[in-house]
C-alpha cells in the first residue's frame, strides 16, 4: 500500500472512508448511537436463521473522523458539508476528505496501523512510537500466524474507548464518568506536570491498578508485553487524534491551506505531538523528600495540621469537597456553577447533538470513601494536590518555580495528604455497607 | 390458516349452538371466546416467539464458539464501527432475552395456554371453558407483554440484561447495567402481564376441571394431561401472586427508588443508588418461590401429555395411573418448599441450605416414580413408532438425564463447585428442551389432526425428530462435561481464563450442533405450515385413542361435541379384554350384561 | 424401523457413559483440586456420578430393551394388560427414597465443613470487595488489623499463604458477584450489604484463576482475578513489599520487568 499522500484530492481515500464520513455527518448518528442500532436488533435476529453457520463477511472497522471538534468547537454545521451546489460546502467536504486521506496515509487503519519512520521508536533519542507493539494491540481479536495474541485493544478496550479511541464505544454512554477520549491528549492521573503528557509508566500503572471508583477495571493479570502493547496503542491513538485536531484547527478554524505533502503533515502536525510524549518522561513531578521515620505522634500532628489547611480559604478544598470531605461542597450550585470535565463543559444545548455522548456532571471526590482514583500512595495524593487533575476543576495547589502563586508549600501538601488519607478512618466515615451483617453473625472474631 | 377448517364447522354446528352463526370474523378468529381458537392463537404466538428465542440462543452460541468474531448479520449491522464485534452488554442482553422469552413466552404459554386451552374442555367433555371471556382475556393480556418485550429491544440501552432471574441490585439500579436502563422496566411490566394472563388461565382451568366434566367423568377417570393441567393451575394460582408482588416491588425500586432490594449506601457505576435499606436476597426468595414451582409448571403438563401419548402408542393401559396422579400432586406440594436450592451459594444461612437440600432430594422421588411407570407402560405393549411416540419416548429418555443431573445440584457440597456452571445449563435444557419441548413437539404431532382436521406428514415428522434428537444431545450433553470443568454461565468470553481456555473446541462443537438443531426446526415449520393447508384430511380418531377429544369431530366445531359424551371408564383401556378392538374409548358403552371386575390396583 | 429407533435410544446410555469415561482422560474434567476440603466435594461428585450412572444405564437400558422387544411390527405376543402393580410401586418408591435420603445425610458433613463451621478465633486474612468489574483486596497492615490507615490494598491478585486456614471476608460494593476459585473448590456469592466469611486451606503453591460466577453486568466476563498461593515466607515478604510500596512518598527506583 502506498503510504504517500495523494496530491489529487480524495484519490487515496478508500470508498468506505467516504461512506463513513457521510454517515458520520448525518446528524442522527451523533447522539446515543445505541438507539438506532438496537432498533434493528429484532428484525435482524429474525433474518439470522438463514445465515447462521454460513459466511462471516468481514467488515473492517475504520477510524471515525473527529467531527465533534470540527462541528462543535469550530462552529461548522452538518449543512456546511452537504448543501448541494454550494461552493463552500463543496470546499468543506473536500477538506474533510483531505483530512481522512492524510490521516489514513499517516496512521493506516485499525486493522493495519502505520507510522512514518520518522516518528517510529528511536532508541537513541528515546522518542517515537513502537510500531511493532502497536501492531500487536491492533487488528481483530485473535491470534496471529506466529501465535502472538493480536487484537488486544479490541478484546479489552474498544467496548468502552471505541475503536478510534474517542471514548465512545458501544458501552460508553452508560458509564460514569465517560471513558477517556484519547484524541484530546488529556489524561487525568499522571505523575507529570499538569500540562504535560503522562509517562509510559503512568499509563501502565493505570492499566494495572485500574481507576477505582470508575468503570476502568484493573488489567493487572495481563502479561507485561501485552500491557506495554496496549499502552503503546493508546499513545498511538492519542497521537493520531491530536494530529487530527491540529489539522482540523488549521483547515477549518484558521482556514489555512495545508500542503498535501508528507513533510507538511509530519513536521507541522504530527512531530510536535510525538515530541510532547517523549518530553513527558522528563517532566515528572518529584516531591521533596519527607523524613522517613514518622512516629504516631508525628502523624497525628501532621493530620491536625492538614485539617487546618483543608479548611484554609486559599486552599479551596472545602469549596468542592465540602467541610466534611464528602464531596458535597458544590451541591445545589446553580446551573452555571456546576462542575464539569473540560470536554463536558464544551457541550452546549446548541451543539449537543454533535457530540457522541450526552453532557455529564462531575462530582467532586467523596474523600471519606477511601477510594482514590489516581492511586492511594501518599505520593499519588501529593501529586493530585500539587498538579491538580488536568481536564477538571481540581486546581494545581502546589507552589514551585513554575507555579509561584500556588497556595500550598510542599510540607503543607504532605500534611494535607496525611489528613486526606486519614479521613476514611475517622469515626462515622465507614459507609454502612462495610458493616457486618447477616452470615457474619455467626463469626466470632477475637 | 385455521379459517378454512373452522369456517366449515361454524355452519355445521350452528344448529346446536344458536350463537355460533351470528359471530363475525373478528369474534370468530380474533376476539374469539372459543377455547380452541384461543388455544390455537396461543400456539401460533408461542411458536413465533420460539423462533425469536431460538435465534437469540444461536447468537449466544456464536459468541461462545467464536468470541468477538463478526457475528453473522447482527454483528456487521449493529456494530459496524467495531468491525462487527458485538458489545459485551449485547451478549448479556442476548442470553437474558433468550431465557425470558423461552420461559415466559414459549414454554409456559404453550403448555398452559395452547394445550391447556385446547385440550381441557375436549378431554373432560365440556363444550367450552367455564369462563370464556376470561379465557379470551388471558390470551389478549399476553399482548401487552409481547409489546413490552418487543419495545424493550428498541429503547435506549436495549432489552433487559440482568439475566432471566433479574437479580437485584443489577436489575433494580439504573446505573448498574448499561443495557438495563428502561429495558428492565419493560421486562418487569411484561412479566406482570404474563402473570395476569396465567392467573386468568389458572382460575379458569381449575373451575372448568372441577365443575364441567361430562357425566361419568370422575376425577380418577381424567387423562393424565388434565391432571397435570389441574395441578399446574393450582401451582400457578398459589405461586404467581408472590412473583407478581416481587415484580411490582422491583418496578417500584426502579421507578420510585423504594429500595426493597437495594441495600443502603450502594454506589453503582459511580452513582448512589437511592436511599436503600433493602435486601437483595429478598428478591431471590420471592422470585424462586414462584420460579421453582414454575419449573414444574413448565414440565408437568408435558409429562401428562407424554403419558397419554405413550399409553396410546403402546396400545396398553398406563402403568400405575394413581401413583402417577399422586406423584404429580407430590411434586406440587414439595415444589413449594424447595426454592432455596437455587440459593445455596447466595449468602443465605447455610443451615437453611441443609433443609432445602433434604426437601430437594425428596422431590426427585415423584419424578423417579413417574419414570418407572412410563417404562412399565411400554413394557409388554405393542409400540407404534409414530412421530408423537418418538418424541414421547425421547422425553422419557431425556428426562432421565435431566432428572439425574438434578441430584448433583441438590447435593449442596457438589453445588459449591457446579453452581452457575454449564452443568446447570445442561440440566435445565435437558428438562426443558429435551423434556418439555420434545413433549410439546410430540403433542403437536399428536393433536394436530384434532386442531386442524388434517394430519402432519409422518415421514418428515420422523426426520425432524431424528435430527432434533441427535443435535439436541450433541448440544447439551457435552455441557455436562464442560460444566464439570467449572465452565461458568453467562460469560461473554470465558477463554481468557486459563482454566477454561481448553474448552473452546468443545464449545465450537456444541455451537455447530446448536445450529444444526436450529436448522432441523425448519423441517418442522415447513411440515406444520404445509399440513395446515395441504395435509391429508383425517377422521375423528386417527390414532385410535380413548380419551374424549377423539369423540368430537376433527376439528371440533363451536361447542365441541355433536353428541353428549358419557364416560364409562378411564382413558387408558387399550387392549382391554372386554372388547375386540385394541382400544376402548371412554364413551363406548360396555357390552350388554358385562360386569366390570374390581379395578386392579 | 423399530430396531432403528431402539438403537438410537441405546446410543444415549452407551455414548453418554462412554463420554464420561473419555472426558477425564482427554483433560475435560474437574480442575486439579488444590484445597484440603476439596476431596469431599470431588468424592461426593464421583459418588453421585457412579450412583446416577448406574440408574441411568439401568433405566435407559430398560427403555432400549422395551422399545426393541415390544415393537408392534415384530412383537407377536398379546399385550400385557395391566394397570400397574402395587408391589412394584412400593419397591420403586422406597428404594429411591432410601437412596436419596442416604445421599442427603451422607453429604451433610461436607456441607457443614465448607459453609457452616466458621473457624473460630481466626482473624480475616483478606477482605475481598467485589465491584464492577474487579476484585478489590484489603489486607491487614503491619498492625494486624483491618480498617486502619496502614491497610494494604491490592486488586485482582489475591495472595494467600499455602497450607494455612485462611478466612476471607467477602463483600460487594455494588451488585451481586460470586467468588469462584475452581481449583480450590470455593464458591460464594458476594452480596452488597453483607459480609460473608469464606474459609479454606490451600495445599500447594501456585497461581489459580479467580472467576466471577454471578452475573454482575456487561463486564461480567472481564472480572478475572487470580489467587496466588505462596509459602508463608514468600507471602510475608510480599506483604512487606506491598506495605512499603503503598507508603511511598517518592517514585521508587524503576524496577526491571
Image: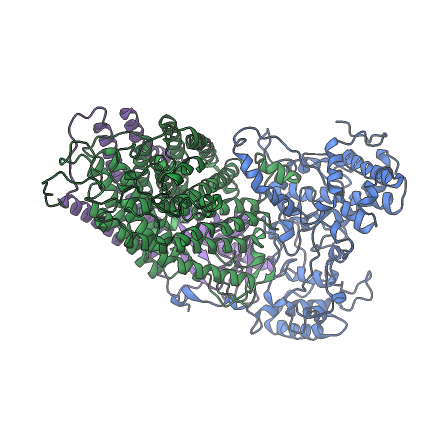
Q: Nearer the viewer, residue A431 or C199?
A: A431
Which quadrant would residue C88 be assigned to in this image? Answer: top left
Seen in the image, is B253 located left or right of residue A232? left
Which quadrant would residue A62 be assigned to in this image? Answer: top right
Q: Nearer the viewer, residue B360 or A160?
A: B360
- Residue at 13% across, 38% down: B591
Q: Position of residue B102 (x, y in %)?
A: 45, 44
Q: Is residue A199 visible?
A: yes
Circle count: 0
Q: Is residue C163 visible?
A: no
Answer above or below: position of A308 versus A406: below
Q: Position of residue B228 (x, y in %)?
A: 30, 48
- Tell me what hue chain A is rendered in: blue
Q: Nearer the viewer, residue B194 or B44?
A: B44
- Tell me what hue chain B is rendered in: green
Q: Who's purple, chain-wise?
A: C
Q: Nearer the viewer, residue C205 or A55?
A: A55
Seen in the image, is A435 located left or right of residue A25? left
Which quadrant would residue A56 be assigned to in this image? Answer: top right
Answer above or below: position of B431 versus A308: above
Answer above or below: position of A46 versus C162: above
Seen in the image, is B505 located left or right of residue B299? right
Seen in the image, is B321 located left or right of residue B51? left
Q: Position of residue A425 (x, y in %)?
A: 57, 70
Amino acid at each position: 500500500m502506498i503510504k504517500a499522500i495523494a496530491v489529487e484530492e480524495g484519490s487515496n481515500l478508500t470508498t468506505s472512508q467516504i461512506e463513513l464520513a457521510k454517515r458520520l455527518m448525518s446528524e442522527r448518528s451523533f447522539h446515543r448511537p445505541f438507539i438506532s442500532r438496537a432498533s434493528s436488533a429484532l428484525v435482524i435476529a429474525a433474518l439470522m436463521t438463514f445465515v447462521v453457520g454460513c459466511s462471516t463477511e468481514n467488515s473492517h472497522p475504520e477510524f471515525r473522523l473527529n467531527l465533534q471538534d470540527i462541528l462543535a468547537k469550530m462552529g461548522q454545521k452538518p449543512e456546511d458539508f452537504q448543501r448541494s451546489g454550494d461552493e463552500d460546502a463543496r470546499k468543506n467536504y473536500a477538506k474533510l476528505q483531505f483530512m481522512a486521506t492524510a490521516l489514513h496515509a499517516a496512521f493506516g487503519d485499525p486493522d493495519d496501523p502505520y507510522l512514518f519512520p520518522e516518528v517510529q521508536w528511536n532508541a537513541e533519542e528515546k522518542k517515537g512510537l513502537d510500531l511493532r507493539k502497536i501492531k500487536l494491540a491492533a487488528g481483530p481479536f485473535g491470534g496471529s500466524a506466529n501465535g502472538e495474541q493480536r487484537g488486544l485493544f479490541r478484546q479489552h478496550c474498544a467496548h468502552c474507548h471505541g475503536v478510534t479511541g474517542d471514548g465512545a464505544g458501544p458501552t460508553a454512554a452508560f458509564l460514569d464518568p465517560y471513558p477517556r477520549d484519547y484524541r484530546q491528549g488529556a489524561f487525568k492521573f499522571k505523575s507529570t506536570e499538569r500540562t504535560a503528557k503522562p509517562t509510559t509508566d503512568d499509563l501502565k500503572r493505570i492499566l494495572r491498578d485500574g481507576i477505582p471508583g470508575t468503570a476502568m477495571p484493573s488489567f493487572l493479570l495481563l502479561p507485561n508485553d501485552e500491557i506495554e502493547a496496549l499502552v503503546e496503542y493508546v499513545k498511538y491513538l492519542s497521537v493520531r487524534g491530536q494530529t487530527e485536531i491540529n489539522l482540523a484547527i488549521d483547515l477549518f478554524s484558521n482556514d489555512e491551506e495545508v500542503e498535501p505533502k508528507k513533510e507538511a503533515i509530519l513536521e507541522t502536525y504530527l512531530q510536535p505531538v510525538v515530541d510532547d510524549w517523549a518530553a513527558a518522561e522528563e517532566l515528572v513531578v518529584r516531591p521533596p523528600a519527607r523524613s522517613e521515620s514518622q512516629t504516631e505522634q508525628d502523624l497525628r500532628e501532621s493530620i491536625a495540621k492538614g485539617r487546618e489547611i483543608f479548611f484554609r480559604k486559599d486552599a479551596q478544598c472545602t469549596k468542592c469537597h465540602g467541610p466534611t470531605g464528602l464531596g458535597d461542597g458544590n451541591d445545589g450550585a446553580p446551573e452555571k456553577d456546576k462542575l464539569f470535565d473540560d470536554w463536558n463543559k464544551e457541550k452546549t444545548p446548541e451543539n449537543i447533538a454533535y457530540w457522541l455522548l450526552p453532557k455529564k456532571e462531575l462530582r467532586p471526590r467523596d474523600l471519606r470513601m477511601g477510594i482514590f482514583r489516581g492511586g492511594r500512595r501518599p505520593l499519588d495524593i501529593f501529586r493530585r494536590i500539587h498538579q491538580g487533575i488536568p481536564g477538571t476543576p481540581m486546581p494545581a495547589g502546589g507552589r514551585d518555580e513554575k507555579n509561584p502563586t500556588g497556595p500550598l508549600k510542599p510540607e503543607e501538601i504532605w500534611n494535607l495528604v496525611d489528613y486526606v488519607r486519614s479521613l476514611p478512618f475517622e469515626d462515622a466515615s465507614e459507609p454502612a455497607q462495610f458493616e457486618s451483617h447477616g452470615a457474619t453473625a455467626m463469626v466470632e472474631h477475637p | 390458516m385455521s379459517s378454512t377448517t373452522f369456517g366449515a364447522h361454524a355452519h355445521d354446528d350452528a344448529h346446536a349452538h344458536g350463537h355460533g352463526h351470528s359471530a363475525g370474523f373478528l369474534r370468530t378468529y380474533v376476539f374469539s371466546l372459543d377455547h380452541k381458537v384461543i388455544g390455537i392463537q396461543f400456539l401460533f404466538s408461542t411458536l413465533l416467539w420460539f423462533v425469536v428465542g431460538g435465534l437469540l440462543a444461536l447468537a449466544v452460541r456464536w459468541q461462545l464458539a467464536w468470541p468477538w468474531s463478526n457475528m453473522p448479520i447482527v454483528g456487521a449491522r449493529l456494530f459496524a464501527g467495531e468491525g462487527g464485534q458485538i458489545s459485551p452488554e449485547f451478549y448479556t442482553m442476548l442470553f437474558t432475552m433468550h431465557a425470558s422469552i423461552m420461559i415466559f413466552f414459549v414454554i409456559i404459554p404453550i403448555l398452559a395456554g395452547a394445550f391447556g386451552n385446547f385440550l381441557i374442555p375436549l378431554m373432560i367433555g365440556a363444550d367450552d371453558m367455564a369462563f370464556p371471556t376470561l379465557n379470551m382475556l388471558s390470551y389478549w393480556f399476553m399482548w401487552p407483554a409481547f409489546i413490552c418485550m418487543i419495545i424493550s429491544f428498541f429503547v435506549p440501552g436495549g432489552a433487559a440484561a440482568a439475566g432471566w432471574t433479574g437479580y437485584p441490585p443489577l436489575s433494580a439500579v439504573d446505573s448498574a447495567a448499561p443495557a438495563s436502563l428502561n429495558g428492565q422496566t419493560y421486562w418487569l411490566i411484561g412479566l406482570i402481564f404474563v402473570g395476569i394472563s396465567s392467573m386468568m388461565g389458572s382460575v379458569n382451568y381449575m373451575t372448568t376441571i372441577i365443575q364441567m366434566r361430562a357425566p361419568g367423568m370422575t376425577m380418577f377417570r381424567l387423562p393424565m394431561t388434565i391432571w397435570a393441567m389441574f395441578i399446574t393451575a393450582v401451582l400457578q394460582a398459589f405461586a404467581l401472586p408472590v412473583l407478581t408482588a416481587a415484580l411490582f416491588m422491583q418496578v417500584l425500586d426502579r421507578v420510585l427508588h423504594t429500595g426493597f432490594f437495594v441495600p443502603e449506601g450502594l454506589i453503582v457505576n459511580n452513582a448512589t443508588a437511592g436511599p436503600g435499606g433493602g435486601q437483595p436476597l429478598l428478591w431471590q426468595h420471592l422470585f424462586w418461590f414462584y420460579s421453582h414451582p414454575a419449573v414444574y409448571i413448565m414440565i408437568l403438563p408435558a409429562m401428562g401429555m407424554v403419558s397419554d401419548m405413550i399409553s396410546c402408542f403402546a396400545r396398553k393401559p398406563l402403568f400405575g395411573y394413581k401413583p402417577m396422579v399422586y406423584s404429580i400432586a407430590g411434586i406440587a406440594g414439595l415444589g413449594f418448599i424447595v426454592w432455596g436450592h437455587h440459593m445455596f451459594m447466595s449468602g443465605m444461612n447455610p443451615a437453611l441450605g441443609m433443609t432445602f437440600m433434604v426437601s430437594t432430594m425428596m422431590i426427585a422421588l415423584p419424578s423417579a416414580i413417574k419414570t418407572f411407570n412410563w417404562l412399565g407402560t411400554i413394557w409388554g405393549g405393542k409400540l407404534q413408532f409414530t412421530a408423537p411416540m418418538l418424541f414421547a419416548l425421547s422425553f422419557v429418555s431425556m428426562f432421565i438425564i435431566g432428572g439425574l443431573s438434578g441430584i448433583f445440584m441438590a447435593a449442596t457440597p457438589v453445588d459449591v463447585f457446579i453452581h452457575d456452571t454449564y452443568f446447570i445449563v445442561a440440566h435445565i435444557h435437558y428438562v426443558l428442551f429435551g423434556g418439555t419441548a420434545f413433549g410439546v413437539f410430540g403433542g403437536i404431532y399428536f393433536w394436530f389432526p384434532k386442531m386442524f382436521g388434517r394430519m402432519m406428514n409422518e415421514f418428515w415428522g420422523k426426520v425432524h425428530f431424528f435430527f432434533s434428537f441427535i443435535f439436541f444431545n450433541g448440544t447439551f450433553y457435552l455441557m455436562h462435561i464442560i460444566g464439570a470443568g467449572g465452565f461458568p454461565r453467562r460469560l461473554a468470553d470465558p477463554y481468557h481464563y486459563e482454566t477454561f481456555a481448553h474448552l473452546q473446541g468443545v464449545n465450537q462443537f456444541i455451537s455447530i450442533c446448536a445450529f444444526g438443531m436450529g436448522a432441523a426446526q425448519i423441517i418442522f415449520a415447513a411440515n406444520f405450515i404445509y399440513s395446515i393447508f395441504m395435509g391429508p384430511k383425517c377422521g375423528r380418531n386417527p390414532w385410535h385413542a380413548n380419551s374424549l377429544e377423539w369423540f368430537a369431530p376433527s376439528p371440533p366445531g363451536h361447542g365441541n361435541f355433536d353428541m353428549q359424551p358419557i364416560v364409562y371408564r378411564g382413558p387408558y383401556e387399550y387392549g382391554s379384554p372386554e372388547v375386540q378392538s385394541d382400544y376402548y374409548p371412554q364413551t363406548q358403552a360396555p357390552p350388554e350384561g358385562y360386569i366390570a371386575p374390581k379395578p386392579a390396583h | 424401523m423399530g430396531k432403528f429407533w431402539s438403537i438410537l435410544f441405546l446410543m444415549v446410555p452407551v455414548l453418554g457413559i462412554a463420554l464420561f469415561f473419555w472426558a477425564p482422560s482427554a483433560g475435560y474434567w474437574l480442575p486439579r483440586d488444590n484445597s484440603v476440603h476439596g476431596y469431599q466435594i470431588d468424592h461426593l461428585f464421583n459418588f453421585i456420578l457412579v450412583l446416577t450412572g448406574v440408574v441411568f444405564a439401568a433405566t435407559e437400558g430398560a427403555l432400549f430393551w422395551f422399545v426393541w422387544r415390544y415393537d408392534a411390527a415384530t412383537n407377536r405376543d398379546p399385550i400385557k394388560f395391566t394397570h400397574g402393580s402395587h408391589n412394584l410401586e412400593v419397591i420403586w418408591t422406597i428404594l429411591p427414597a432410601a437412596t436419596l435420603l442416604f445421599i442427603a445425610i451422607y453429604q451433610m458433613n461436607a456441607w457443614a465443613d465448607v459453609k457452616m463451621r466458621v473457624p473460630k478465633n481466626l482473624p480475616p486474612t483478606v477482605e475481598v470487595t467485589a465491584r464492577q468489574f474487579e476484585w478489590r483486596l484489603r489486607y491487614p497492615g503491619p498492625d494486624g488489623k483491618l480498617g486502619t490507615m496502614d491497610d494494604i490494598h491490592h486488586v485482582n491478585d489475591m495472595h494467600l499463604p499455602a497450607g494455612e486456614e485462611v478466612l476471607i471476608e467477602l463483600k460487594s460494593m455494588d451488585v451481586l458477584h460470586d467468588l469462584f476459585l475452581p481449583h480450590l473448590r470455593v464458591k460464594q456469592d458476594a452480596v452488597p450489604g453483607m459480609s460473608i466469611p469464606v474459609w479454606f486451606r490451600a495445599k500447594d503453591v501456585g497461581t489459580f484463576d479467580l472467576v466471577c460466577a454471578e452475573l454482575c453486568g456487561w463486564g461480567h466476563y472481564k472480572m478475572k482475578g487470580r489467587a496466588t498461593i505462596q509459602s508463608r515466607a514468600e507471602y510475608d515478604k510480599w506483604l512487606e513489599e506491598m506495605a512499603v510500596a503503598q507508603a511511598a512518598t517518592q517514585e521508587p527506583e524503576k524496577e526491571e520487568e
